[in-house]
Image (spheres, helix red, strand yellow):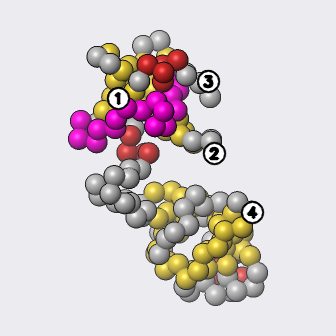
Amino acid sequence: MENKEVLIGKVLRPRGLKGELKTDATLFNLKKVLIDNKNFIVENVSKHNGFVYFKLVGVDNIDAAEKLRGKEIYAEPILQEGEILTSDLIGFTVVCGDKKIGKVKSVESYGGGNFLSIACFGGFRNIPYEDEFIVETNMTKKEIIINDAALQEDIIL
């Protein structure tokens, strides 16, 4: 699968005088990021109290960091063999046994895991995207096979 840049968070504010950025990023093992259509090399990353702090090459003072406040951060995640981006699941057909349940319209994350929002007859179903409920994700067929337990676990989000 081809990697692509995805939204990983937002610059919240500068931290300190040397250009470090406080972010709400969801990924932190990165070598490069894209902010405001500019590529930056990541010099240093740290994580503290649920926030990710980036020090970027060329952002060396509080004034340079302040210019990035509120900007979205994009990155090309480095995927290992067998890993997928949840955004790639949008449009996949969801199947249980020999029944087609519907299509994935979105993937939502609420900290406790990802949920597939599936458009089906009569509305939407929300199913946890967890090994307990997912039998197989077939990237070639663009299909997700779920078990019967997933249909009993419909969650209202």
Q: Quadrant of the C terminus?
A: top right
Asked if disc 4 and disc 2 are in contact, CB closer than 8 Å, the reply is no
Q: Label 4 sits on what residue type?
A: Asn
Q: CA distance from mark 1 to mark 2?
A: 23 Å
Badge 4 marks a residue whose secondary structure is loop
Q: Looking at the image, is mark 1 or mark 2 nearer the viewer?
A: 1
Name the spot of residue 35 as percent of width and height, x first. 53, 69
Q: Mark 3, residues whose alpha carbon is within 10 Å: few (<14), some, or many (≥20)?
A: few
The residue under label 4 is: 49
The residue sitting at the front extreme is 132
Name the spot of residue 94 as percent of width and height, x first. 36, 27
Q: Which label belongs to residue 116?
A: none
The residue under label 3 is: 156
Q: Which label belongs to residue 111?
A: 2
Q: Looking at the image, is mark 4 or mark 3 nearer the viewer?
A: 4
Q: CA distance from mark 4 to mark 2?
A: 15 Å
Q: CA distance from mark 1 to mark 4?
A: 37 Å
Q: Residue at point 75% right, 85% down?
A: 17
Residue extent of the magenta highlight: 124-141
Q: Earlier in the sequence, mark 4 or mark 2?
A: 4
The residue sitting at the top extreme is 122
Q: Is residue 124 visible?
A: no
Badge 3 marks a residue whose secondary structure is loop
Q: Is residue 118 left or right of residue 47?
A: left
The residue under label 1 is: 145
